[in-house]
Amino acid sequence: MLTERLITDVLLAALSTGGDFAEIFAEDTYNTAIRMIKGKVEEGVTGRDYGVGIRVFQGTKSVYAYTNDTARENLMKVAMEAAAALEGSHRVGSIVLARLAVEKFNPIVMEPGQVTQKEKVGVMRKAHEAASGYHEQISQVTVNYLDTDQNVLIANSEGLVAEDRRVRTRLSIHAVATKGAEKQSGFYGPGRHMGFEFFDKIDIEEYAAEAARIAVTMVNADYAPSGKYPVIIHNEFGGVIFHEACGHSLEATSVAKGASVFAGKLGQQVASELVTAVDDGTIPNAWGSQNIDDEGRKTQRNVLIENGVLKGYLIDKLNARRMGMEPTGNGRRQSYKFAPTSRMTNTFICAGESTVDEIISNTEYALFAKRMGGGSVNPATGEFNFAVSEGYLIRNGKIEKPVRGATLIGQGAQILQKIDMVASNLATGQGMCGSISGSIPTDVGQPTLRVSEITVGGRKEAD
């Protein structure tokens, strides 16, 4: 995208007023988004993001500027403007660039540009028909298709030059069930760091039927009881609670400022001994995986918590300086319009030794949160509030009935301590995570696990 001569000149210009590190992030991304409502394509958008971001460090100070005009004169101008925000002596020296050999562990077979819109809509129609035909109570189905083809070049004043390509594909199904004046919804949104071949590897009709099943089950359910009692959180998207309430608090974005309940606690017991948690950006073709992060560093497997002991944080380059630690391959951003910061990739609680049946049969009374919905979290304290999109009441070791309207309320670090059973059925779910560096694809996951006590918000008191 940029010549090595231009890269060198721009980096030197960015360092001209005293910066000690400069970085270029160039991006050329193609996106396709299609929306289908009630079996008809309502919206189809294709777009291109093209531009360059320039970042300069001086110690722990950082300046970021970006532009979509990549002409030499403009890039030099933007670099000088970024440099002017930092005061210091002129940097003398040269930059010798060395290209990083990027290992490609996210192979792509069918590139988005090779697939016709008709084929993409055909997959959407299959999902629509499977969901809408599931039950007479299904009143509306919305299907969204997304693919992105992002090409990046990252270079910095330490001599790094790295290029990477990220192709992602996702289909999300939202089904609504109606019973009188009541409406409930079900959702599934599978995705991978993969091309259109993704749809040869999954049964999209099964996912669509599952979204419809959730909606129908919940519209016919009684309201959940409120109170403090055990909660069994199912696998897959159940991991969103760890992601939000604990994962963000393990990012250096919060830790470096001391605005995290986990700051200064390396080596301490922060969770039940049954809990081992990992962030791994190297899982082949996983939704949150990348060959390199957005600072040009190879992604890696980072053990965050091991047998309850805090082992590490997720660290980007700038916060590594602030913390006196090494980056972990977690510098991420939505696009060239954002400076990178520490972000999760594929984050999950590891499998345990129990079975789901054992957990349920050993539980006298509990809420079984089979599917989690949206919520809110305070990263500084880990306090969370999450809706349960599919829930069941457990009584005397058996699933008694479906319940709706449940909300889980708690504090992430406390919940980690109260996990007393962990199953072996680890699975992950896909989502988009928002933070100061934009919205990025992340996987969340866990096996089914039991928390001995959580505050549950509902419509009636627990009996």
Image (cartoon, rainbow, N blue to C red):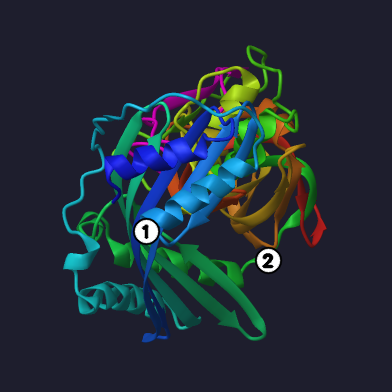
Q: Specify the segment rendered in magenta.
A: 288-315
What residue is shown at x 61% (from left), y 27% (from top)? Answer: 89
- Residue 220, image x, y percentages: 60, 72
Is residue 362 something one can see in this rendering?
no
Q: Secondary structure at mark 1?
A: loop
Question: Height in image: 222 above or below 406?
Answer: below
Q: Identify residue for label 2.
A: 222
Task: Tell me the tag on residue 252.
Answer: none
> Quick check: 254 left or right of 347?
right
Whether 293 is among the magenta residues is: yes
Question: Height in image: 335 above or below 162?
Answer: below
- Residue 334, image x, y percentages: 48, 53
Is residue 280 something one can see in this rendering?
yes
Q: Secondary structure at mark 2?
A: strand
> In which image quadrant can residue 305 be found?
top right
Viewer-side residue, 176 vs 110:
110
> Quick check: 438 left or right of 163?
right
Viewer-side residue, 270 vs 47:
47
Which dot, 2 or 1, sits closer to the camera?
1
Kind of residue at badge 1: Ala
Label 2 CA crowd tier, 10 Å (few <14, some 14–19, many 20+): some
Q: Identify residue for label 1.
A: 71
Question: Height in image: 266 above or below 333?
Answer: above
Query: Which is more N-terminal, label 1 or label 2?
Result: 1
What residue is shown at x 49% (from left), y 65% (from top)? Answer: 187
Viewer-side residue, 76 vs 366:
76
Label 1 CA crowd tier, 10 Å (few <14, some 14–19, many 20+): few
